[in-house]
Image (cartoon, rainbow, N blue to C red):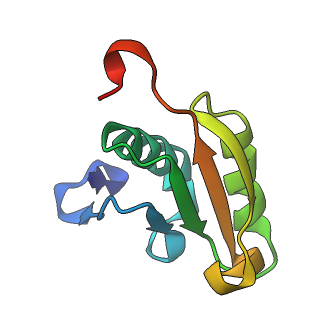
Amino acid sequence: MRTSLNDREQDTVEIPIDGVLDLHTFSPKDLPYLLDDYIEACLERGIYEIRIIHGKGKGILRDRVRALLSRHASVDSFSEAPLEAGGWGATLVLLKEMSGEGKS
């Protein structure tokens, strides 16, 4: 997946679609588009469980990620990651499996 930040080609970042999204290198203002694009790319590849690494800090980014996830139509559920997967510095997300024609 390629995401263009600030609509400038030189800011395009290549992101592997492997079910793990590390937000440390992204600006919080890009979060809504980044999450939408990443979730869509995962669904296209049949990845229905993803881990979003937002870091621990004060929890501001975690709360923003979870607010966006709570409104996303493709998200079935989300929870804090287990300790071995990042604990409260990461969020596990279960996506709704595509049905009908979109499912491969």
Name the residue: 63% across, 53% down. 93
Q: How many marks are shown on the rendered structure?
A: 0
Establish if 77 lies above or below 84. above
Please name whichever residue, 93 or 64, is drawn nearer the observer in this view of the structure.
Answer: 93
Q: Nearer the viewer, residue 46 or 90?
A: 46
x%, y% of residue 71?
A: 70, 33
Compared with residue 48, is residue 13 higher up or lower down, i.e. above or below? below
Seen as rendered, the residue at the extreme left is 9
Q: In x, y percent, where is residue 60?
A: 77, 66
Residue 2 in percent (x, y) is at 24, 54
Horizontal relation, residue 19 to residue 77: left or right: left
| 92 over 82 or under it: above or below | above
Residue at 32% across, 58% down: 17
Image location (x, y in percent) of residue 57: 75, 82
Q: Residue at (62%, 79%) from the top-left corner?
A: 85
> In the picture shown, does residue 13 fall above or below 72?
below
> Which residue ends up furthest to the right in the rendered image?
58
- Left or right: residue 99 versus residue 31 is left
Question: Which quadrant: the C terminus?
Answer: top left
